Structures are given as structure tokens and as C-alpha cells.
Amino acid sequence: MNNFKLLAMLCIVMGFSSCRTSTKDHTNKTGKEYTSAYICPMHCEGSGAEVPGLCPVCGMDYIKNDKK
């Protein structure tokens, strides 16, 4: 019976730890991926440009940054 309790607790702990949606911190929005005239929709780190193009990280088309 103790093994069952231990297994149940382990499953619960693993379930809660896997519920995080993202490990990426989006609170610092001062990088080029947020401030450029054209940005990647996924905000890939290091992406962004002053002219239209493709994201070098994920390959998606840049979109016009409406917040600039």
C-alpha cells in the first residue's frame, strides 16, 4: 500500500510540474524581436528588422510592428 501512495504522489508532482505553458520569459520586451519595425509573430530571440523579410530562427514572414 505504501508503494501505491508513493507512486500516486509522484504522478501528482510530475503532473503539476509539466503544466507550465512556457519556459520563455516574455516580460522583457525591450529586445529587437519586440522593438523593430518588422517582427516575427513568434518573437524569436534575435529576430526583427527594419525591412520586411524572414525570421532567421523559425523562417516565418516578418509582420509590421503596430506598436512601433
Image (cartoon, rainbow, N blue to C red):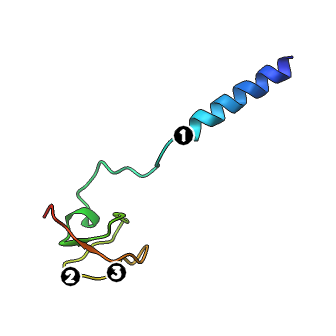
Q: Quadrant of the N terminus?
A: top right
Q: Quadrant of the C terminus?
A: bottom left
Give the SS element for disc 3: loop
In the displayed structure, 48 sits above or below 68; it is below
Give the SS element for disc 2: loop
Badge 2 crowding class, 10 Å Cα cut-off, few under 14, some 14 to 19, many 20 or more, is few
Is disc 2 in contact with disc 1, using a CB cutoff of under 8 Å? Answer: no
Mark 2 or mark 1: name the one nearer the start of the chain: 1
Q: Please report the residue visible at 42 percent of the width from the left and 52 percent of the height from the top.
A: 24
Say which quarter of the image contains residue 60: bottom left
Is disc 3 in contact with disc 2, using a CB cutoff of under 8 Å? Answer: no
Q: In the image, what residue type sits under mark 3?
A: Leu
What residue would you read off at disc 1? Answer: 19
Q: Please report the residue visible at 17 percent of the width from the left and 72 percent of the height from the top.
A: 37
Q: CA distance from mark 2 to mark 1?
A: 38 Å
Report the side of 67 relative to 2 (left or right): left
Q: Residue furthest left?
A: 68
Report the side of 43 relative to 5 (left or right): left
x, y percent for residue 50: 19, 78
x, y percent for residue 2: 84, 17
x, y percent for residue 43: 33, 63
In the displayed structure, 62 sits above or below 14; it is below
Badge 1 crowding class, 10 Å Cα cut-off, few under 14, some 14 to 19, many 20 or more, is few
Q: Please report the residue visible at 32 percent of the width from the left and 66 percent of the height from the top.
A: 41
What residue would you read off at disc 3? Answer: 54
Give the SS element for disc 1: loop
Q: Which mark is residue 34?
A: none
Q: Please report the residue visible at 27 percent of the width from the left and 72 percent of the height from the top.
A: 48
Say which quarter of the image contains residue 54: bottom left
Q: In the image, what residue type sits under mark 1?
A: Cys
Q: In the image, what residue type sits under mark 2?
A: Val
What residue would you read off at disc 2? Answer: 51
